[in-house]
Image: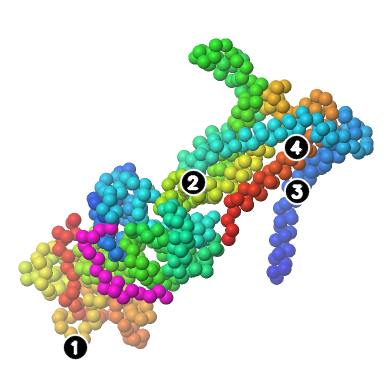
Amino acid sequence: MKQSLLKRRSLTLVILLTPMVLLLAGFLVLPVLGLLRSSFLPSTHLLDGTGFSLKHYVHFFSDTYYSSVLVETFVDGLIVSLVCLLIGFPTGYSLARLTSAARRWRMIVVILPLTLSLVVVVFGWLIILGRNGLLNSLFVYLGIFSSPKTLLFSRPAVLIVLVQQFLPFMILSVMSVVTQIHPVLEQAASNLRANRFVTFRKVILPLAVPGILVGFNIVFVLSISAFITPRLIGGARVAMLGSLIYETIMAQLNWPFGAAMAFVLFVSGLAFTVALNALVASRFTVRG
Amino acid sequence: MLALSKERDNFVPEADDLVVELRSVSKYYGEVAAVSNTSIGVRRGELLCLLGPSGCGKTTTLRMVAGFVEPTSGSITINGVDMTRQPPYRRDTGMVFQSYALFPHMTVAQNIEFGLENLKWPRDERKARVEEMLRLVELPHLADRLPAQLSGGQQQRIALARALAMRPAVLLLDEPFSNLDAQLRLRMREELREVVRSVNVTTLFVTHDQEEALAMSDRIVVMNAGQVEQIGTPGEIYESPETPFVAKFIGWCSLLKGTVGPDGSFTSAAGLRLDGNWSAGSATAVIRPEHVRLSTDDASGPSYQGRVLQAHYYGGATRIVLDLNGEQLTMQERFPFWRHPKTGDLLSVTISTDDLRVIPAEEDRR
Ligand SMILES: Nc1ncnc2c1ncn2[C@@H]1O[C@H](COP(=O)(O)OP(=O)(O)O)[C@@H](O)[C@H]1O
Ligand SMILES: [Mg+2]
């Protein structure tokens, strides 16, 4: 009786999961495995030839330029995630504490940027930050700048645009976790002589860690793999690994080396987020 | 079981030693008065209960004392210090929430220690106090559990221990038993009473359950539509209700509207006459089931013929609604099963008027 129920359950599970597993296997796992294979090709051109070689990995790690770009990419990812957290937490928290009616149109404002094509967003920023753009005109008009300055093609510009793009993910993750924290817990803390700051540190923050972590992971992964923004906003002067891979594959047609870089990014990104999650989890989970 | 401190049984709180005092407190939500012009004093060491129907403003009153709701007007003092505009964390109160509100990410011990940390108690004193509180609620073995691993009754006791650990001037409880099943509710009621007595803490308690209020309180504040109807001991509230609302709300009773004549006797609107010595004027008679008895041969006073409208058998007793000259009265009597009255039967009853309360009409218009 129990046995057959269990069997029926697992059958349902299989049926429910099959479409997703097939989709992921066909369009994600297989291509990634293909990419992995091609990163070991000795060729430096298209995906021709056979053989096995570590030369692309050796090339990546022996040239300090590439490893410095890798480090830079990670630092950028961390900065973007942290800034998103600093801006996104208060926003997500206050959204969560609104009534659902009051939340509705504010949510639309948060989500709207995600519905625009990334290219449109980036061109919008080009108009704002360009030499004859909005910001330069304004600053010159106000007398803050004596002549237009180059605001584009700098690392801060790239980081600002990345923050703008990925902020909604942080806001939504924080909001969803804070809606799970019942406001009566804040009142209880307050009754137990905790001021707003202590309540935040000892009650809200620990309970919000899962949402913060989700938001942080999403923003971090999206940032380190960004390529359109660094290319268009940062130009040739700002190198992030994503745009470097794009360049290598699309301009130089060097698929194997591009694949190798993609794999380095993939593995190191994964290792970093797993380590971060483990660290935070061990710090914030209670024994019990 | 906890040892009851005997001297506390005869405890009489002093009328002028107030731990919490609300003076003419009102709270408006827009145009709606949740609480209006309410004055209540909680005496040192007493268990004072706010009793009233749902929506009468009990929770709002309690939350104003805790500081979660700011009064629109009036003042609140705790131990003589004006706290009206102070945030909750500056007030010397300990609250047990209806949902317990234990911190889910902290162990039982950490929950209890939380308030002591914020009060900057030294570490070893905190640990000792946590142990003491766990012993008080008889759950020392649960110190390292998480709240999710506790039953409802256990969570309730931990919430109580957490609130009491800080030695607050006043313990606040909002319908603390409403999430428990009926049997557990009775037991927790006893336990709470014992714990509160053993640590001698002034307590302000909210309930809509009149039985709970009668059983637990030193004094009761009966509230209705945001206002205080009556403040008194359970005995005073039950025996001499000052308004028909209080009479109706506390225990079963029939309210008869009528007038008291110059001879001191009461005549109801439908013409039912009760002999007595009340002051003349229009009035409401409060007739409780225990005032109405089946006539016996040696009964004193007049006997009335009543027609049975409803009879509900409750095992131990039968509750009967009688029609007496056009007035409906409820009585409670033990009948052998074979003599059980049926709808339409005639019963001969007497009404004992010795301790019967007749409320003059001026008193219902406050
Ligand atoms: N935050 C609020 N906003 C608007 N009205 C409220 C609010 N809180 C309570 N009320 C109203 O105030 C009245 C008293 O509420 P409450 O104190 O919760 O009653 P009780 O605890 O006696 O059931 C009710 O009519 C309720 O609808
Ligand atoms: Mg209430």
Please tell me which of labels 4 and 3 falls first in the chain.
3
Q: Are marks 4 and 3 in contact (CB under 8 Å)?
A: no
Which amino acid lies under the numbered mark 1 shown in the image of this protein? Asp
Residue stretch in magenta: B1-19
Q: Same chain for marks 4 and 1?
A: no
**Residue B297's disc number:** 1
**Residue A21's disc number:** 3
Chain of the residue where label 1 is placed in the rendered structure: B
Q: Are marks 4 and 1 in contact (CB under 8 Å)?
A: no
Q: Name the dominant secondary structure of the magenta segment.
A: loop
Residue B162 x %, y %: 44, 60
Which amino acid lies under the numbered mark 4 shown in the image of this protein? Leu
Left or right: B290, with B207 as reference point: left
Chain of the residue where label 4 is placed in the rendered structure: A
User: What residue is at 26 percent from the left and 53 percent from the top?
Assistant: B80
Q: Secondary structure at mark 1?
A: loop
Q: Quadrant of the C terminus of chain A?
A: bottom right
Give the residue pinned by disc 4: A265
Left or right: A106, with A247 as reference point: left
Q: Secondary structure at mark 3?
A: helix
Which amino acid lies under the numbered mark 3 shown in the image of this protein? Val
Give the residue pinned by disc 2: A200
The 10 Å Cα crowd at callout 1, few under 14, some 14 to 19, many 20 or more, is: few
Does mark 1 have its CB less than 8 Å from ligand 1? no
Mark toward the viewer: 4 or 3:
4
